[in-house]
Image (spheres, helix red, strand yellow):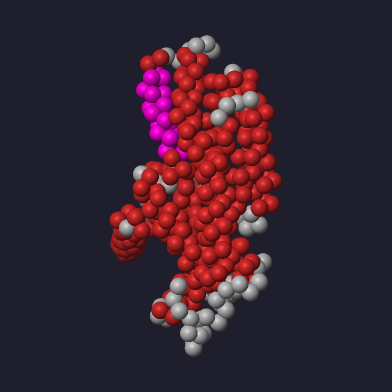
């Protein structure tokens, strides 16, 4: 005899399902409002993001000077000027030639796709022309837009040249103030927030800063190694457009998994069009070897602490970011996902059952093995204590 459903348990299950669904809808609504607000204020949000990314790269030399007794304003000024000199040198030596060859690079990719199309139409695949037409035509159009967009983003920023210049200037000023006054920000923020928020928000922000800095510095270093080794291999094989391909490899390194595949695909296509099948296979072998060295040697050496994200999560984050905001979304997807993971980890610690080892920790305490830094952006020894008199950043 089949079991009879309990009306009481059924109603309780339905009520629980309705309550959970309503709570999820409210969370999704709040997330949509946050994304809408970011889009509405993007002209201000984007320079802040760029400034934070640049600050993660320029903070180590600033910290070094401050520890040697330099005043914050002087250390920030010297590092900012040096950063401008280095950036101008890169623009003159690399960005200008890359921009001048971007059209040739795009043409080479399109020609390579056409060659693959002809090969697929012949034996042994014998794929019909009509089957390839729609998909490959769409792929050609997207490759043209993507390659030109990535090169343009690396040279001028986002949008038009005017918007890129305004964004760059504003980001540089913000970077200077972050370098100068960054360590006073979190103590000031803690004094403005009530109750638990005074401890929770600065703790999450400090962990997020550490995660963002680790990601940017490690990806920049690993991307530089990839660009140097792959560019050297392309130069030895005799593939043209070595400099644009090396720069594309460096930029693509900031989009984990997808970026490496895209940059390698472009390099192989250029080698196929210009040098033939043999050199294209050699280039493919070089890229595979370099990527294996990156995944098994470079990144473990550079990243003492990973982002704590599974490869599938990284891939989904990049896909979602690209669909929402194009190239910019792809570049920011992984650090954004890492920051969400930091927030979720902190929430788990605070919501853990007593006695599990997670509750009872100092909200601002570092993870095991983490070196304590008392003068990083967002931290200032004693600045949050009563009577410290610290001004806001």
Residue located at (66% from left, 71% from top): 68
Residue located at (66% from left, 32% from top): 233
Where is residue 90? Give x, y as percent: 55, 45
Where is residue 80? Give x, y as percent: 53, 60
Quadrant assignment, res 11: bottom left
On the question of residue 15 being in view, the answer is yes
Where is residue 195? Give x, y as percent: 42, 81
Residue located at (61% from left, 62% from top): 61
Residue located at (41% from left, 78% from top): 193
On the question of residue 288 being in view, the answer is no
Q: Is residue 170 left or right of residue 387?
A: left
Image quarter where the C terminus lies is bottom left
Whether 332 is drawn above or below 288: the answer is below
Residue at the bottom extreme, as displayed: 387
Foreground: 251 or 96? 96
Magenta-colored span: 131-151
Foreground: 272 or 27? 272
Residue 149 covered by magenta stretch: yes
């Amino acid at each position: 005899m089949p079991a009879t459903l309990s009306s009481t348990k059924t109603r309780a299950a339905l009520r629980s399902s309705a309550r959970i669904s309503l709570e999820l809808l409210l969370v999704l609504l709040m997330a949509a409002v946050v994304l809408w607000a970011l889009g509405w204020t993007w002209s201000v949000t984007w320079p802040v993001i760029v400034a934070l990314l640049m600050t993660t790269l320029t903070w180590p030399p600033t910290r070094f000077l401050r520890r040697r007794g330099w005043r914050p304003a002087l250390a920030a000024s010297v590092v900012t000027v040096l950063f401008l000199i280095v950036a101008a040198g890169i623009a003159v030596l690399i960005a200008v030639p890359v921009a001048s060859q971007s059209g040739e690079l795009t043409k080479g990719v399109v020609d390579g796709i056409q060659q693959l199309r002809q090969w697929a139409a012949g034996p042994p695949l014998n794929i019909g022309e009509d089957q390839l037409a729609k998909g490959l035509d769409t792929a050609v159009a997207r490759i043209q837009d993507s390659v030109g967009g990535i090169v343009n983003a690396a040279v001028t920023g986002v949008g038009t040249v005017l918007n890129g210049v305004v964004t760059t200037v504003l980001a540089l000023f913000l970077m200077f103030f972050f370098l100068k006054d960054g360590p006073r920000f979190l103590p000031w923020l803690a004094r403005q927030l009530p109750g638990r928020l005074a401890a929770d928000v600065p703790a999450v922000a400090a962990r997020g800063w550490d995660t963002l800095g680790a990601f940017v510095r490690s990806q920049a270093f690993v991307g530089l190694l990839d660009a140097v080794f792959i560019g050297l291999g392309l130069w030895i094989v005799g593939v043209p457009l070595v400099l644009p391909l090396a720069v594309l490899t460096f930029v693509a390194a900031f989009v984990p998994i997808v970026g490496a595949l895209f940059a390698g695909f472009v390099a192989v296509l250029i080698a196929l069009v210009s040098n033939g099948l043999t050199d294209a296979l050699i280039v493919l072998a070089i890229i595979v070897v370099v990527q294996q060295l990156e995944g098994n040697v470079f990144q473990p050496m550079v990243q003492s602490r990973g982002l704590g994200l599974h490869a599938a999560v990284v891939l989904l984050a990049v896909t979602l970011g690209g669909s929402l905001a194009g190239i910019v979304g792809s570049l920011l997807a992984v650090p954004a996902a890492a920051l969400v993971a930091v927030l979720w980890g902190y929430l788990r610690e605070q919501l853990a059952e007593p006695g599990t080892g997670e509750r009872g920790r100092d909200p601002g305490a570092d993870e095991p093995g983490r070196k304590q830094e008392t003068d990083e952006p967002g931290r200032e020894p004693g600045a949050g204590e009563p009577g410290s008199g610290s001004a806001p950043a």
